[in-house]
Image: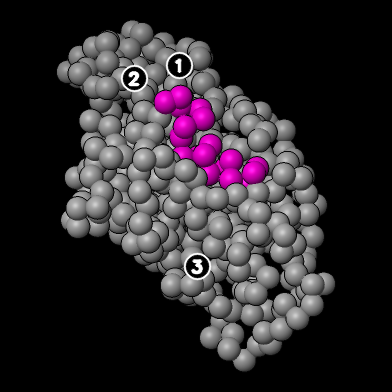
């Protein structure tokens, strides 16, 4: 498994072979079909396996594929599998990725999400997190392929930050498969729109990757999985619903949080990461076992959306990407955030700063600190105060990035954003990590 650092800015170009010669729809055993699956599938020919020459993948490779991720002493029931693999969606792209891997090509698998994707509470973090464990299945199943692994999980980030950092953290590597995970961190009113924009931006990107919506949950069933599942179904994106496995297991007594989670009630322990990876890799096994007998029509991203999806063409601008319109007592410096770029603007004496932007939407990414030194800043758009940023995170779990939205419109317009210390600010330190924009 080849790991690509997130800060690397070299774009890899992959030659993609178009190999599909016949269109045929069928569902995976016991699963529902997504909306992109044609209703005319029953009328198509089903003779894909008449001769060995018709096989997309060697039957021997299918027979010897890696088993789903080992969950140790945790028993995985058929009910868990059926609940977890909520909807296979349209598998055209995923089957193409598997076929290319079987032919020994280079494949890039990327994960974008919050702290769970990053591996928080897994031990050791880098090799016990669900992202690494599920990628290992690809390496073991396709030993002749080069499998590149990108983990773009950042703690305390939701799909708003996810869709804005998507280009720098994921799409720059032209991934073949992207797993998205934000169901625990999404909760704001606009997150359904940011999540839909995230999925659509990935699906519409140049490398045309397969996408899997991974829906996670907590001990108390706090999650955004239902809203994310609606978006995934609309787009015929494969959906793995670990949140439902947790919920159903607790109700019927087959699975407790102590089996899979940490005492904080949010992050999975090693058992939870293994179970998440098991659901993913069982799904992969199902798909690979059907690849020679089942085909899907070419995937097309529907133009119809559930939301306005105004964040599809979004970016996160750092200090190296944009200059302030005016600045007083702010300095360019590195900020020790978990973002892939750390160049930003900092004041220690309550400075002011402004930016002129032409975009449909914009937001400020700021750095929260627990030391009591950070203050509160008022945000003005075209001279009107629209919100106040509180960068003081005293008593919180640790320093981290957060954001505020400044404006959001249906068309691109030019606006002036100004940040000034609040009159009753409790601190003079304030750090801006970046500017979110959507065009």
Which residue does the image show at 39% across and 34% down from the upper left? 270
From this viewpoint, which residue is outermost toward the bottom?
Answer: 43
Q: Compared with residue 21, is residue 149 higher up or lower down, i.e. above or below? A: above
Q: Compared with residue 213, is residue 69 higher up or lower down, i.e. above or below? A: above
Give 102 or 266, whichever is nearer the viewer.
Answer: 102
**Magenta span contains residue 130:** yes
Q: Earlier in the sequence, mark 3 or mark 2?
A: 3
**Magenta span contains residue 56:** no
Please state if 216 lies on the left or on the right of 387 as rendered: right
Q: Are marks 2 and 1 in contact (CB under 8 Å)?
A: yes
Which residue does the image show at 36% across and 14% down from the upper left? 351
Give 361 or 80, whichever is nearer the viewer.
Answer: 80
Please state if 139 lies on the left or on the right of 409 as rendered: right
* Residue 344, label in figure: none
Label 2 Cα crowd, 10 Å radius (few <14 / some 14-19 / many 20+): some
Q: Name the image quarter holding the N terminus.
A: top right
* Residue 336, label in figure: 1
Task: Name the residue carrying label 2.
Answer: 399
Q: Which residues are magenta?
A: 123-140
Q: Please name which of the two marks, 3 or 2, marks the residue nearer to the observer.
A: 3
Which SS class for mark 3? loop
Q: Position of residue 204 (x, y in %)?
A: 60, 58
Q: Earlier in the sequence, mark 1 or mark 3?
A: 3
In three-dimensional space, the C-alpha distance between marks 3 and 2, rounded to whole angstroms, equals 39 Å
Colouring convention used in this rendered image of the protein:
one colour
Q: Compared with residue 56, is residue 186 higher up or lower down, i.e. above or below? A: above
In three-dimensional space, the C-alpha distance between marks 2 and 1, rounded to whole angstroms, equals 9 Å
Label 1 Cα crowd, 10 Å radius (few <14 / some 14-19 / many 20+): some
Which SS class for mark 1? loop
Q: Earlier in the sequence, mark 2 or mark 1?
A: 1
Can residue 318 be spotted in the picture?
Answer: no
Task: Name the residue carrying label 3.
Answer: 89
């Amino acid at each position: 498994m080849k790991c690509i650092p997130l800060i690397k800015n070299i774009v890899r170009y992959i030659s993609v072979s178009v190999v599909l010669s016949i269109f045929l729809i069928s569902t995976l055993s016991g699963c529902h079909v997504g909306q992109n699956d044609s209703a005319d599938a029953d009328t198509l020919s089903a003779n894909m396996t008449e001769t060995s020459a018709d096989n997309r993948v060697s039957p021997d490779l299918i027979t010897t594929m890696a088993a789903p991720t080992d969950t140790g002493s945790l028993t995985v029931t058929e009910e868990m599998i059926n609940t977890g693999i909520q909807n296979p969606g349209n598998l055209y792209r995923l089957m193409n990725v598997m076929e290319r891997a079987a032919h020994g090509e280079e494949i890039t698998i990327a994960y974008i999400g919050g702290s769970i994707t990053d591996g928080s509470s897994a031990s050791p973090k880098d090799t016990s997190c669900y992202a690494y464990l599920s990628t290992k299945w690809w390496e073991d199943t396709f030993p002749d392929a080069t499998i590149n692994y990108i983990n773009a999980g950042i703690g305390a980030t939701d799909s708003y930050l996810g869709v804005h950092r998507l280009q720098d953290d994921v799409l720059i590597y032209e991934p073949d498969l992207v797993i998205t995970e934000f169901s625990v961190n999404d909760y704001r009113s606009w997150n359904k729109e940011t999540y839909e924009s995230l999925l659509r931006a990935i699906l519409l990107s140049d490398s045309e990757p397969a996408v899997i919506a991974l829906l996670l949950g907590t001990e108390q069933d706090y999650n955004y999985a239902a809203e994310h599942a609606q978006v995934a179904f609309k787009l015929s994106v494969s959906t793995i619903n670990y949140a439902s496995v947790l919920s159903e297991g607790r109700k019927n007594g087959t699975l407790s949080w102590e089996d899979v989670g940490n005492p904080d009630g949010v992050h999975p322990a090693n058992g939870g990461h293994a179970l998440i990876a098991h659901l993913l890799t069982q799904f992969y096994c199902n798909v690979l076992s059907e690849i020679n007998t089942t085909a899907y029509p070419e995937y097309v991203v529907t133009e119809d959306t559930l939301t306005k999806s105004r964040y599809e063409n979004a970016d996160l601008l750092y200090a190296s990407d944009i200059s302030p319109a005016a600045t007083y007592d702010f300095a360019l410096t590195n900020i020790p955030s978990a973002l892939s770029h750390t160049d930003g603007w900092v004041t220690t004496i309550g400075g002011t700063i402004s930016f002129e932007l032409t975009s449909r939407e914009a937001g400020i990414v700021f750095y929260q600190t627990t030391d009591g030194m950070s203050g509160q800043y008022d945000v003005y758009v075209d001279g009107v105060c629209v919100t106040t940023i509180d960068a003081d995170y005293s008593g919180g779990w640790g320093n981290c990035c957060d954001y505020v939205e400044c404006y959001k419109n249906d068309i691109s317009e030019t606006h002036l954003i100004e940040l000034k210390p609040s009159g009753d600010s409790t601190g003079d330190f304030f750090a801006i990590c970046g500017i979110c924009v959507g065009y």
